[in-house]
């Protein structure tokens, strides 16, 4: 077994070194101008369990229902899409148009007791809600205790 001296500052320095090499060396290849080439987008997802179902809520602000795709295959729920935005600024002297886009894909392994054929999805006000009903095996059962 090798002994390694513990250095409490190493994680901070390692983070700084990683940022230095990735940001300064590779930045010119990934950015056309001030952050406009493509954007990185990973939608936030809230998952909660209720007695008869699981509910996944994904925040997809500014997206249309047609831009979101949901698939269930081999026990994995995947939703993906592409987010596009365009901002135009016009004055007397110039017109400035900025466009950005980004794709995303999130996958979740489903528990065995989820009924895949009964999964439902709804999209309203930038929130995608997916309802995953539990099968009979997963539902809690009440057992009566008899007193003799």
Image (tube, rainbow, N blue to C red):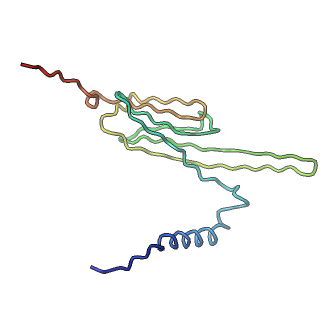
The furthest residue to the left:
148
The total number of labels drawn is 0
- Judged from this view, the residue extending furthest toward the front is 148
Across and down, in percent, residue 56 comes to 46, 36
Residue closest to the eye, 30 or 127: 127
Q: Give percent across and percent down for residue 90.
A: 86, 46
User: Residue visible at 14% across and 22% down?
Assistant: 145
Q: Position of residue 37 (x, y in %)?
A: 68, 56
Describe residue 60's horizontal placement relative to residue 36 as left or right.
left
Horizontally, is 25 left or right of 143 in the view? Answer: right
The answer to which image quadrant residue 119 occupies is: top left
The answer to whether residue 61 is above or below residue 146 is below
**Residue at horizontal 55%, vertical 31%?**
123
List x then y, in percent, for residue 57. 49, 36
In the displayed structure, 87 sits above or below 132; it is: below
Tell me which residue sits at (76%, 45%) in the image. 87
Quarter of the image that includes the C terminus: top left
Left/right placement of residue 56 relative to residue 26 reads: left
In the picture, the quarter occupied by the N terminus is bottom left
Say above or below: 99 vs 5: above
């Amino acid at each position: 077994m090798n002994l390694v001296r513990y250095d409490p500052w190493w994680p901070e320095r390692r983070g700084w070194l990683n940022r230095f090499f990735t940001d300064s060396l590779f930045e010119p290849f990934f950015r056309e101008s001030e952050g406009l080439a493509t954007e990185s987008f990973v939608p936030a997802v809230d998952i909660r369990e209720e007695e008869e179902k699981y509910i996944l809520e994904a925040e997809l602000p500014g997206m249309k229902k047609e831009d979101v795709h949901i698939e269930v295959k081999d026990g994995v729920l995947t939703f993906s899409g592409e987010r596009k935005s365009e901002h135009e600024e016009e004055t007397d002297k110039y017109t400035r148009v900025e466009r950005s886009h980004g794709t995303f894909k999130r996958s979740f392994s489903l528990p065995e007791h989820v009924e895949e054929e009964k999964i439902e999805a709804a999209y309203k006000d930038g929130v995608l809600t997916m309802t995953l009903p539990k099968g009979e095996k997963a539902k809690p059962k009440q057992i009566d205790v008899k007193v003799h």
